Image: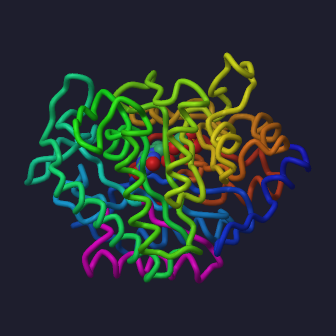
């Protein structure tokens, strides 16, 4: 990697009250190591190690809001209740003790079942219209009261994040989970104000979630919203087919209070609208930044040879060149870059890059998923 690319990656970044020493973000990764939903000391030490390893910003694994069926695995951490919040207090204190910055990723899975276990919650799952995928029913359609309570639960979780001392928070609006089930016309068939024929209309739930969170945290606390065009239910889906549709989707969310869009792709170098600017054109984060003026995070297979969904099929991945990242950072296409599996496997990944020890970068192995180290 050239000196300029290293410089680009290690340039500080500031937005509102958040100051980062570099542009590298640890992507949120569900680990399911929190018995009874309570993150323990092992979880705190796992995140502390990434802060010690010079990660600029750590985003936690998805941690669920206070709704009866908001998670789909029994060891996913809660972001509510005294015991779980005490666990999170320990996490952020450990990260701060070594100079790190961190935000929780607030999550509700909606109708999506885990593909790792067959565990189900003891109450029916909830989603916009009782569908998990086109024509595939699962659980109940949310009533207007359920929607209001869910929006309030996001606000409550956000207030707790701020109270505990987190530096930022992220809302999980991607990958086919609850917020994305509202965005997607195939899973949102509602006839009320939370449905509609346009993406803009179907974004109202997310807009209300963002407003509730903004009210809870005040103006100066940055809010990140993670979005994806693709769904785990169908990788080929696109919510926004044109830049105009994308503006109709993102601008009201920015207006509601989003500071940073975290634009999830499986491969960050893929052009979002190649028919407009070619195969080397702007990626999702690039278009989101261009259309909204907001800061953006890109993500997807940084430094690795294949994409993350293959990890769940038991596939490993080898270190890959960072040249494309270099090119895109130099043209200022996005502000921050998130890294998932490489940081899950190796807490020293950032340090190795900073010190130019590219030869020491290691493979990602699916056995890394089985431990918290
Ligand atoms: C084990 C694992 C768990 C994940 N859990 C989450 C999650 O809780 N929330 C989320 O938004 N993305 C999740 N992802 C996706 C990652 O945040 C990231 O987008 C993806 O791994 C691509 O980055 P990578 O290619 O650098 O690994 C997960 C990925 C992995 C490998």
Which corner quadrant of the image does residue 285 belong to? top right
Q: Position of residue 110 (x, y in %)?
A: 26, 46
Q: Where is residue 24 in the image (x, y as percent from the top left)?
A: 68, 56
Q: Where is residue 4 in the image (x, y as percent from the top left)?
A: 90, 49
Q: Looking at the image, which is closer to me, 330 or 290?
A: 290
Can residue 92 be found in the magenta stretch? yes
Q: Residue at x 54, y 41 (%)?
A: 264
Q: Residue at x 66, y 71 (%)?
A: 16
What range is drawn magenta here?
Answer: 77-105
Q: Residue pushed farthest top?
A: 275
Q: Position of residue 334 (x, y in %)?
A: 71, 46
Q: Is residue 189 above or below residue 1?
A: above
Asked whether residue 364 appears in the rendered view, the answer is no
Determine whether, in the image, residue 318 is placed left or right of residue 6: left
Q: Residue at x 20, y 37 (%)?
A: 129
Query: Which image quarter is the N terminus in?
Result: top right
Determine whether, in the image, residue 301 is placed left or right of residue 139: right
Q: Is residue 69 above or below residue 316?
A: below
């Amino acid at each position: 990697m050239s000196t300029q690319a290293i410089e680009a990656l290690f340039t500080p970044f500031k937005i509102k009250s958040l100051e980062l020493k570099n542009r590298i973000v640890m992507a949120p990764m569900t680990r399911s190591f929190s018995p009874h939903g309570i993150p323990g000391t092992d979880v705190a030490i796992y995140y502390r190690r990434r802060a010690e390893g010079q990660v600029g910003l750590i985003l936690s694994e998805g941690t669920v809001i206070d709704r009866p069926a908001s998670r789909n695995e029994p060891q996913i951490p809660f972001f509510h209740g005294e015991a779980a919040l005490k666990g999170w207090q320990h996490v952020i204190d450990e990260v701060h003790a070594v100079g790190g910055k961190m935000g929780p990723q607030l999550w509700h899975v909606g109708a999506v079942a885990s593909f790792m276990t067959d565990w189900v919650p003891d109450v029916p799952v909830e989603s916009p219209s009782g569908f998990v995928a086109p024509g595939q029913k699962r659980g109940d359609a949310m009533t207007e009261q359920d929607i209001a309570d869910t929006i309030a639960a996001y606000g409550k979780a956000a207030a707790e994040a701020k109270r505990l001392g987190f530096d930022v928070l992220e809302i999980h609006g991607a990958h086919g989970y609850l917020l994305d089930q509202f965005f997607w016309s195939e899973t949102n068939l509602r006839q009320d104000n939370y449905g509609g024929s346009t993406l803009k209309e179907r974004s109202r739930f997310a807009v209300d979630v963002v407003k509730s969170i903004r009210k809870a945290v005040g103006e100066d606390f940055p809010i990140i919203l993670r979005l994806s065009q693709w769904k785990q239910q169908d990788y080929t889906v696109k919510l926004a087919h044109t830049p105009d549709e994308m503006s109709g989707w993102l601008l009201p969310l920015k207006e509601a209070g989003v500071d940073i869009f975290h634009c999830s792709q499986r491969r960050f170098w893929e052009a979002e609208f190649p028919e407009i600017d070619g195969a080397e054109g702007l990626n999702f984060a690039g278009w989101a930044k261009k259309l909204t003026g907001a800061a953006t995070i890109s993500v997807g297979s940084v430094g690795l040879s294949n994409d993350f969904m293959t990890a769940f099929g038991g596939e490993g991945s080898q270190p890959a060149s960072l040249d494309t990242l270099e090119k895109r950072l130099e043209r200022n296409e996005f502000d921050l870059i998130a890294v998932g599996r490489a940081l899950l496997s190796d807490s020293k990944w950032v340090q190795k890059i900073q010190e130019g020890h590219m030869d020491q970068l290691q493979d990602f192995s699916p056995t890394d998923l089985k431990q918290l180290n």
